[in-house]
Image: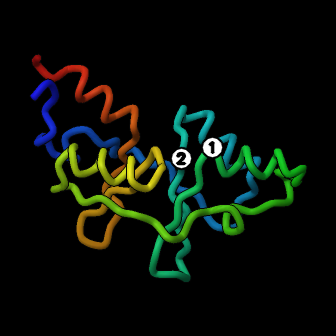
Amino acid sequence: MLVNERELVREAMSRDVVMVGPGHTLRQVAAVMAKRNVGAAVVADNESSGVGIITERDILRSIAADEDPDVERALDHQTTDVVYATTDWTMGEAALAMMRGGFRHLIVLEGNDVAGMLSVRDVVRTWAKAPA
């Protein structure tokens, strides 16, 4: 095995998760994502039990459709049918879920709480450090 597929998600995920509300405009979401240098944010709604995710691709699609980023809201562009990882998943399980789903970010849960975010960048960084 060239990479450590058995390493756990909790060891590679970012615990510093960008959280936005469903009413934030796409410009506001883009600004906070750019400031924090991340490609995804969790959309948390205090009136809803679940969370969604909004990514740079979602914002890009909206702008390409000539929608106004000062009017469009995160609520209308987030993904709500989210695949979640848990802190106990292996990196191999996470990578396979990303590959099968065609996405680059996984919200990581610990119980019912958001514990972190795992990106493809985190997977590559972790595996690049693995001994050959």
Q: Secondary structure at mark 1?
A: helix
- Vertical side of 46 occupied by 20: above or below: above
Q: Residue pushed farthest top?
A: 132
Would you say 42 lies left or right of 69 here? left
The residue at the point 21 percent across, 55 percent down is 87
Would you say 80 lies left or right of 61 here? left
Q: Which of these two is toward me, 103 or 50?
A: 103
User: Which quarter of the figure has residue 129?
Assistant: top left
Residue 67 spot, x, y in % from top left: 87, 54
Which of marks 2 and 1 precedes in the sequence? 2
Q: Which of these two is toward me, 15 or 109?
A: 109
Marks 1 and 2, Cα distance to the nearest angstrom? 6 Å
Q: Residues within 10 Å of mark 1 (few under 14, many from 20)?
A: some
User: Which quarter of the figure has residue 111?
Assistant: bottom left
The residue at the point 30 percent across, 26 percent down is 125
- Name the residue tied to disc 1: 56
Residue 36 spot, x, y in % from top left: 54, 35
Could you tell me the amino acid type at mark 1?
Glu
The residue at the point 51 percent across, 57 percent down is 42
| CB under 8 Å between discs 1 and 2 | yes
Q: Secondary structure at mark 2?
A: strand
- Name the residue tied to disc 2: 40
Residue 93 spot, x, y in % from top left: 23, 51
Name the quarter where the N terminus is drawn: top left
Could you tell me the amino acid type at mark 2?
Ala
- Vertical side of 108 occupied by 35: above or below: above
The residue at the point 25 percent across, 21 percent down is 128
Badge count: 2
Residue 86 spot, x, y in % from top left: 24, 60
User: Which quarter of the figure has residue 16?
Assistant: top left
Name the quarter where the C terminus is drawn: top left
